[in-house]
């Protein structure tokens, strides 16, 4: 008799409790709207590179989308079999599962190491509970972010907050890239466990060799059929809770003209819309020969790595991008309103990025951009936040994982 465990929560709990922990199993749980990407991808890649003796299960929204094309986008095609979506190294193999299914809960219940970059809300809400001999690493997905965490919002539901508190109690190790982030996690999540000042694995890309960076650029440019001499400006705004679109009214021609006048060369605008707004992309923007939709590209960090300029509003991606020391600009037409609704940890004016509230100010900021002053301000900003990014974050996490698998922790 087949029983749908989705409709029998009590039986699901029994089913999960019966799962034995596999001492060689690592489960990555990604965000619902993200695939094989973010910090999880870069930890996974380092595990594969080092041929760690383990089995990797990577939970994503739709495993069927994990194809050769997707892996080509993420720079990982060479690691995976093209026919069954499984990759195998000398000792390490990887397979994919679907987030939110009873089987995915079972994967989590049988893993020695669990690594997530988001809340395990669905799993805990459905009855999943961490076992004593499991080790949970939380990487989160922000980076020196200026936006307050959702757990801090006044409108958050009590039930959601209780689930988050339970997850916090499960967390054995929380990754941070700075004294600032560590303080935020302690305050917002009331976290008193192990805070590992490791850096963010996804940011290791900014410290790659020039040869590796050129290879990444070649792959990305080939994907979008761009000439090698074209300059790329990436526009990556965040979403608004009210789903208003007038905040994204970017003057494309004026922007490209200002960039050409200031920095020279030919420019293409690449737009990376927030995953929450993917269905509205063609409504908000007019894509064409000089305006590309790169929202479905697998790896945001690779886009940041190859972009010559970044424009955003409140997205934490600019705090990753700043590690490259390349020009970053803020285009935010609703600073006051957004601050009232979401609130910031510190003022935008305290960052190195020139701020514009309209297209005219953005063009003026580009015209007056001082590269030397900007780089000096980045150094001061990173020092002030106690940032320790150095390109070795993934190495540190893999070393931690090895110790857990070897029962040294």
Image (tube, rainbow, N blue to C red):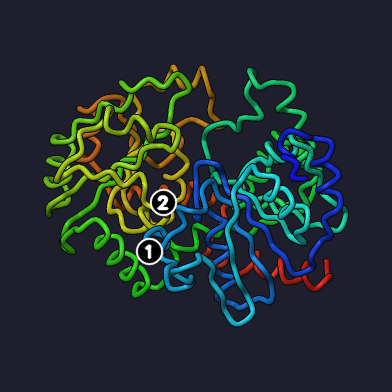
Could you tell whether 203 is left or right of 232 in the image? right
Q: Is residue 349 visible?
A: no
Circle 1 sits on which residue?
A: 72
Identity of the residue drawn at 24% across and 55% down: 224
Picture coordinates of residue 47, whole percent (x, y): 60, 70
Q: Quadrant of residue 363?
A: top left
- Label 1: state its secondary structure: helix
Circle 2 sits on which residue?
A: 300
Please say if the residues under marks 2 and 1 sit with CB atoms less than 8 Å apart.
Answer: no
Give neighbour class at mark 2: few <14, some 14-19, many 20+ (Cα, 10 Å).
some
- Label 2: state its secondary structure: helix
- Outermost bottom residue: 90
Q: Which comes sooner in the sequence, label 2 or label 1?
A: 1
Picture coordinates of residue 301, whole percent (x, y): 42, 55
- The answer to which of 354 and 197 lies nearer the viewer is 197
Q: Is residue 83 visible?
A: yes
Identity of the residue drawn at 64% across and 42% down: 100
Identity of the residue drawn at 65% across and 44% down: 101
- The answer to which of 53 and 257 lies nearer the viewer is 53
Picture coordinates of residue 221, whole percent (x, y): 25, 60
> Which quadrant: the N terminus?
top right
> Which quadrant: the C terminus?
bottom right
Using the image, tell me which numbered label, if any, was put on residue 172. none
Could you tell whether 288 is left or right of 387 in the image? left
Picture coordinates of residue 55, whole percent (x, y): 67, 69
Q: Quadrant of residue 211?
A: bottom left
Q: Is residue 263 above or below residue 75?
A: above
């Amino acid at each position: 008799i087949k029983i749908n465990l989705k409709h029998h929560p009590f039986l699901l709990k029994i089913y999960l409790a019966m799962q034995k922990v596999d001492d060689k199993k690592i489960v990555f749980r990604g965000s619902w709207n993200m695939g094989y990407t973010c910090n999880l991808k870069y930890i996974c890649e380092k595990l594969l590179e080092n041929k760690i003796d383990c089995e990797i299960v990577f939970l994503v929204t739709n495993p069927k989308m994990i194809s050769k094309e997707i892996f080509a986008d993420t720079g990982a095609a060479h690691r995976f079999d093209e026919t069954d979506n499984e990759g195998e190294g000398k000792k390490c193999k990887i397979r994919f599962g679907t987030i939110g299914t009873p089987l995915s809960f079972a994967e989590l219940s049988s893993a020695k190491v669990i690594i997530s970059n988001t809340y395990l809300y669905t799993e805990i809400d459905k009855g999943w509970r961490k076992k004593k001999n499991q080790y949970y690493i939380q990487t989160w997905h922000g980076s020196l972010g200026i936006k307050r965490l959702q757990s801090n919002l006044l409108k958050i539901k009590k039930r959601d907050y209780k689930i988050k508190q339970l997850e916090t109690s499960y967390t054995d190790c929380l990754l941070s890239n700075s004294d600032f982030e560590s303080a935020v996690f302690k305050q917002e999540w009331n976290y008193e466990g192990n805070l590992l000042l490791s850096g963010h694995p996804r940011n290791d890309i900014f410290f790659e060799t020039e040869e590796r960076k050129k290879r990444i650029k070649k792959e990305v440019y080939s994907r979008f059929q761009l000439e090698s001499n074209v300059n790329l400006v990436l526009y990556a705004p965040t979403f608004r809770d009210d789903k208003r679109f007038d905040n994204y009214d970017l003057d494309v021609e004026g922007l490209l003209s200002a960039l050409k006048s200031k920095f020279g060369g030919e420019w293409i605008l690449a737009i990376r819309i927030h995953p929450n707004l993917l269905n509205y992309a063609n409504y908000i923007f007019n894509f064409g020969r000089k305006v590309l939709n790169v929202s479905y590209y697998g790896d945001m960090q690779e886009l940041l790595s190859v972009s010559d300029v970044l424009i955003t509003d409140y997205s934490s991606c600019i705090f990753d991008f700043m590690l490259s020391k390349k020009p970053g600009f803020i285009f935010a037409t609703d600073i006051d309103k957004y601050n009232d609704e979401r609130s910031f940890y510190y003022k935008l004016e305290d960052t190195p990025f020139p701020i514009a509230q309209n297209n005219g100010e953005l063009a003026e900021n580009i015209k007056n951009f001082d590269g030397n002053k900007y780089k000096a301000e980045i150094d001061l900003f990173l020092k002030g936040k106690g940032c320790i990014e150095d390109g070795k974050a993934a190495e540190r996490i893999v070393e931690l994982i090895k110790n857990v698998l070897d029962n040294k922790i």
